Amino acid sequence: MEMYMGMSRGMEIVDLHQKIQSDWQKSSHMSKRIAGRRILHIAMERRERRRKLRNIAMALLMAAAFFTGFFGRTLFDAYAKEESEHDLQRYYTSIQLEPGDNLWKIASRYAEKAGYTAAEYVEELKRMNRLPNEQVHSGEYLTIVYLAE
């Protein structure tokens, strides 16, 4: 019986050892499964981040293309307008002032045609006609400038 008990005790140790080994393998298998899922989750997050970044980059490129086209066209038109103004020649003529005329009314009539703002045109009239101030009288003659082909 002692021998049988010894065997039984030995068997218990072997069984316990096998059970521990089996549990360890199961837990190892579970931890590998969990680690695999974690790696898969991380990879999916990275893929999602890359997709979002790619979408943002595409949106920025499209916005840049739009603004480049819009502002490029605007600048192109501005340069074309400047070149066409260079084709125009400056001409001078003399006008007789009528009652109620002043330099600002004359400037409002001719400034845009001459490529000036109203204030610039008034200053140009004063310079060309050697006027000390903006005071003019009806019946006087003024030299004005305008642009034409």
Image (tube, rainbow, N blue to C red):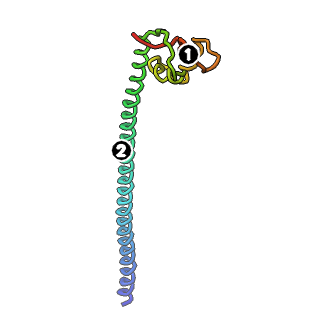
Element assignment for label 1:
helix
User: Would residue 97 be found to the left or right of residue 42 on screen?
Assistant: right
Give residue 3's position: percent from left, percent from top. 37, 86
Relative to 96, does residue 22 appear above or below in the rendering? Answer: below
In the depicted view, which residue is nearer to us: 130 or 50? 130
Read off the residue under disc 2: 55
Describe residue 136's horizontal placement relative to residue 76 as left or right: right
**Nearer to the camera, 58 or 51:** 58
Determine whether 68 is above or below 20 in the image. above
Q: Residue at x 53, y 24 (%)?
A: 104
Percent from the top left, x then y, of residue 5?
Answer: 37, 87
- Compared to residue 10, the image places residue 42 above or below, namely above
Q: What residue lies at 53% left-to-right and 11% top-to-bottom?
A: 141
Rate crowding at label 2 as few (under 14), some (14 to 19) or many (20 or more) other CA atoms within 10 Å.
Answer: few
- The residue carrying pointer 1 sits among few (fewer than 14), some (14 to 19) or many (20 or more) residues within 10 Å by Cα, namely many
Measuring 39% from the left and 45% from the top, which residue is drawn there? 53
Q: Position of residue 118 (x, y in %)?
A: 52, 24
Quarter assignment of residue 126:
top right
Whole-angstrom CA distance, mark 1 to mark 2, is 59 Å
Quadrant of the image containing the N terminus: bottom left
Q: Secondary structure at mark 2?
A: helix
Q: Which residue is mark 1?
A: 125
**Residue type pointed to by label 2:** Asn
Three-letter amino acid code of the residue under disc 1: Leu
